[in-house]
Amino acid sequence: MKAPKDQHFLIDTDAVDFIADSIPVEGRNVLEIGPGGGVLTAALLERGANVRAVELDGTLLPNLERRFKDELSTGQLTITRGDASRVPLPEFDLVIANLPYSISSKITFRLLETGFEAAVLMYQWEFAKRMVAPPGDGEYGRLSVMVQTYADVELILELPPKAFNPPPEVDSAVVKILPHEPPIKILNREAHEILVRELFSHRRKTIQNGLKGMKSIYGEEIMASLINGLPKELLGKRPEMLSVTEFIELANLLANHIQ
Ligand code: SAM
């Protein structure tokens, strides 16, 4: 198998400790995606975590198996070889990982769908900023809404390229994710996802024009009837002004129209 990209190993030991100490891990099952050389794995094991690692690159396994021989024999550590965005995941309560950036989006939504108590994950700085951006912020978009609908997110650490070996081309950031139920019930998750995607695919358009553009998906009649029932003030806004709750309210109205 070709060696995967995304191999930037964390060498800033203060950052390793900060990440490992950012949530209590003792006695908990912690999923670690991409243990690499095992720097974070070691810190988590030292703090009493049961680490469930998933690593794509088989060439890294002999080193990990040597380094963590004892923990592997007691079961405190297990290592699954495979692509964390696709393989069946081991059981876990928490996720702590210096993620491979190429699967940031896919793995984040997979984890949110699977469910967990808390996660501390490293992302590209730009991606992390979009995840945590509030309404009205230039970075607020589809990713912000879809993540913040299902979790509280907080950027807890920024790291420059020199914290890694080899250094990546971009800055990185660590985000703490605490999942929660959506602020109000989502009647139709698919309709909610489509609405958020479509409105942000033309972020300069007003909500009215964005909704009109969705006639190719739901038909002209349905969209016209939805628009007719909405307040003018909302129709004149741009998608970046709508809160997570307002997106759900709008999606629920759409869901009622397409029933
Ligand atoms: N955790 C180590 C550290 O902090 O130094 C390594 C982090 S490195 C950014 C990402 C790791 O994820 C590498 O070990 C890489 O082989 C692994 N990886 C890449 N794609 C993966 C995937 N799809 N599933 C699981 N691991 C993956």
Image: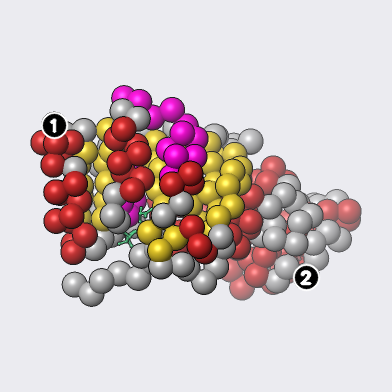
Q: Nearer the viewer, residue 60 or 17?
A: 17
Residue for point 68% across, 52% down: 133
**Amino acid type indicated by mark 2:** Arg
Magenta residue check for 24: yes
Q: Position of residue 236 (x, y in %)?
A: 86, 61
Q: Is residue 17 above or below residue 129?
A: above
Residue density around tag 1, few if under 14, some if 14–19, many if 20 or more, within 10 Å: few
Q: Can you tell which mark lies on residue 126? A: none
Magenta range: 16-35
Query: Which residue was labeled with disc 2?
Result: 204
Residue for point 76% across, 56% down: 137
Q: Position of residue 174 (x, y in %)?
A: 53, 49
Magenta residue check for 61: no
**Amino acid type indicated by mark 1:** Thr
Query: Which residue was labeled with disc 1?
Result: 74
Residue for point 21% across, 60% down: 60
Q: Position of residue 214 (x, y in %)?
A: 65, 68
Q: CA distance from mark 1 to mark 2?
A: 56 Å
Residue 57 shows up from this direction = yes
The kind of secondary structure element at disc 2 is loop
The kind of secondary structure element at disc 1 is helix
Q: Nearer the viewer, residue 143 or 69?
A: 69
Q: Is residue 195 above or below residue 178?
A: below
Residue 186 shows up from this direction = no
Q: Is residue 105 above or below residue 253?
A: below
Res. 171 image quadrant: bottom right
Q: Nearer the viewer, residue 214 or 73?
A: 73
Residue density around tag 2, few if under 14, some if 14–19, many if 20 or more, within 10 Å: some
Dot 1 or dot 2: first in sequence order is: 1
Res. 75 image quadrant: top left
Colour convention of the picture: secondary structure
